[in-house]
Image (cartoon, rainbow, N blue to C red):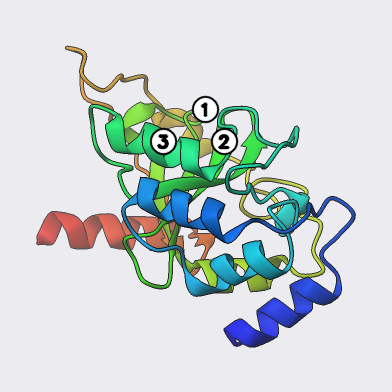
Amino acid sequence: MTDDEVFEAIRSDPGPDVLPVASSEAVAEAEEAIGYPLPSLLRRLYLEVGNGGFGPRGGIIGVRGYDFWKSDIFADITESAVGFRTESYGRQAGMIQLLDWGCAIASLLDCRHPEGAMWGWDPNLCCLDHALFPQDITFASWLAESIGRDFADPFYDGYFEVSPQDEAVIAVSTIGEEEEPCMWLPPVWVKGRKAGIWERRHRSADGLAS
């Protein structure tokens, strides 16, 4: 789907939780906090469809003025941008928390990428070292895949199905602390989907060979 097609699909059926449109000043404020412009599709949705409340589970977070229970950690994307920019590790600078799935799981949008690369955050399956992971999908494609879907689980249906191999290698580690390195093999994502064990082993072998 093109950006225009995604926009028209969301505008024609934004869902029951969509909020009133954002002001151009609030969008500009968010972009200043991020340090990068929002993807043009998201900017247009905020200004012409609603200040959040659309997308997967009706949970996309808005700019200043967003006031909804579906964001437990940050009040809006501007607040998340400031928080990420000032964190000591700096891994999420230029990103925003776009959707809060609950249980500390979130979808993040990397605004340093012109089309908006999507990232996932889930500290529950392993440790903080591996909580942040790229999903190999752009914002527009991610949003297009959400149209007409319920998203029973975060990121995609069946996300919480963990293989025996995964369970065997999960370890605990904390960034910045003197502990044994985590030996968990992070999941590989291909076009927004978690790859199977074969793809993960192949990617790991490629990395070791390089």
- Work out whether residue 149 or residue 18 is closer to the camera in this orientation and state it: 18
Identify the residue position indicated by label 3 in the image: 131
Q: Residue furthest front?
A: 25
Residue at (34, 66) in percent of width and height: 113
Q: Residues within 10 Å of mark 2 (few under 14, many from 20)?
A: some
Q: Are marks 1 and 2 in contact (CB under 8 Å)?
A: yes
In this picture, residue 89 sits left or right of residue 131: left
Instruction: Name the residue type under label 1.
Output: Asn
Looking at marks 1 and 2 on the same chain, the residue that comes earlier in the sequence is marked by: 2
Where's residue 30, x and y in %? 46, 50
In this picture, residue 86 sits left or right of residue 142: left
Q: Quadrant of residue 176?
A: top left
Q: Callout 3: helix, strand or loop?
A: loop
Where's residue 34, x and y in %? 37, 49
Instruction: Please state, as top left, top right, bottom left or bottom right, where the C terminus lies in the image.
Output: bottom left
Q: Residue furthest right?
A: 16
Question: Is residue 185 shown above or below 83?
Answer: below
Residue at (72, 36) in percent of width and height: 67
Question: Is residue 171 shown above or below 178?
Answer: below
1 or 2: mark nearer the eye: 2
What whole-number distance in Å separates the C-alpha atoms at marks 1 and 3?
A: 8 Å
Identify the residue position indicated by label 2 in the image: 105
Question: Is residue 68 shown above or below 201?
Answer: above
Look at the image and tell me whether residue 176 can be seen.
yes
Identify the residue position indicated by label 1 in the image: 124
Instruction: Please state, as top left, top right, bottom left or bottom right, where the N terminus lies in the image.
Output: bottom right
Residue at (38, 59) in percent of width and height: 111
Instruction: Name the residue type under label 2.
Output: Ile
What whole-number distance in Å separates the C-alpha atoms at marks 2 and 3?
A: 9 Å
Q: Callout 1: helix, strand or loop?
A: loop
